[in-house]
Image (cartoon, helix red, strand yellow):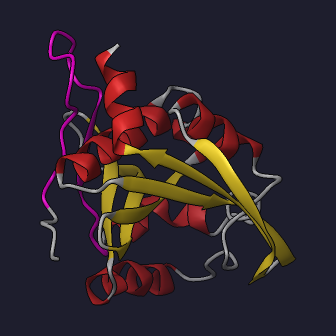
């Protein structure tokens, strides 16, 4: 099933101005996100090493069109410069995996929570029944974000990933559509 790659806006409380917009990620977003994705500390928990050249990051962003993943740049409302991105890949009918990255200078403002919540709203509105995230057991900020959003730890996959920092376990966090709808209704 093909899903549209349109801009996303926050669903829910419309009484407050939106701080963020999610628009389709473009290869040119590499220029704004290169310092983050070249930083070994910021890329520590990724399954790949930091990027050495902005051209390689542009190519990585270009290849989104050739996968089952869709990616959106996180931008502050009224601006165009990406401060991060969210992504979703459909793994099977009704089930999507998500990923996200936020530039260091944009952290600590609640942007990741808002952007991932927007993505979750979109995926469930498209008919997904389950969303999951695969995170490193030592990635405490990601675990905290997923927990705040209502995800449940479903399991640990031992020695799951061969990464630039060695063989790593994965924690799988999942969220069902009915859990999200009951959480956002309250």
Q: Number of marks in the image?
A: 0
Q: Is residue 13 left or right of residue 106?
A: left
Residue lying at 15% horizontally and 17% vertically, measured from the top left? 14
Q: Is residue 80 visible?
A: no
- Residue 60 at what x, y percent from top left? 43, 83
> 26 above or below 155?
below
Give the vertical position of 155 relative to 67 (above or below).
above
Toward the viewer: 170 or 115? 170
Find the residue positioned furthest to the front: 178
Q: Quadrant of the N terminus?
A: bottom left
Residue 85 vertical position relative to residue 112 in the rendered view, above or below: below
Image coords of residue 109 (percent x, y): 51, 26
The magenta segment is 6-27
Looking at the image, which residue is at 37% across and 77% down? 61
As rendered, which of 116 and 72 lies closer to the eye?
116
Q: Quadrant of residue 151?
A: top right
**Residue 183, magenta (yes or no):** no
Image point 67% across, 47% down: which residue?
153
Q: From this viewpoint, is residue 162 visible?
A: yes
Q: Nearer the viewer, residue 34 or 135?
A: 135
Q: Quadrant of residue 156?
A: bottom right
**185 lies left or right of 161:** left
View extreme (top): residue: 15
Residue 122 % position (x, y): 23, 47
Quadrant where the image shows the C terminus: top left
Main SS of the magenta segment?
Answer: loop
Residue at left offset 41%, top offset 43%? 116
């Amino acid at each position: 099933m093909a899903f549209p790659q349109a801009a996303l806006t926050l669903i829910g409380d419309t009484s407050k101005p939106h701080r963020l917009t999610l628009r389709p990620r473009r290869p040119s977003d590499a220029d704004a996100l290169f310092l983050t994705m070249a930083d070994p500390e910021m890329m520590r928990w990724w399954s790949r090493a930091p990027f050495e050249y902005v051209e390689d990051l542009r190519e990585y962003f270009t290849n989104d069109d050739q996968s089952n993943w869709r990616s959106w740049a996180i931008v502050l409302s009224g601006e165009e410069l990406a401060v991060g991105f969210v992504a979703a890949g459909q793994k099977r009918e009704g089930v999507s995996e998500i990923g996200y990255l936020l530039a260091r200078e944009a952290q600590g403002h609640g942007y990741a929570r808002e952007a991932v919540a927007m993505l979750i709203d979109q995926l469930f509105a498209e008919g997904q029944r389950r969303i999951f995230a695969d995170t490193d057991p030592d990635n405490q900020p990601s675990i905290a974000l997923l927990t705040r959003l209502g995800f449940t730890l479903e399991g640990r996959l031992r020695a799951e990933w061969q990464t630039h920092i060695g063989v790593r376990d994965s924690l799988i966090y999942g969220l069902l559509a009915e859990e999200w709808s009951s959480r956002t209704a309250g």
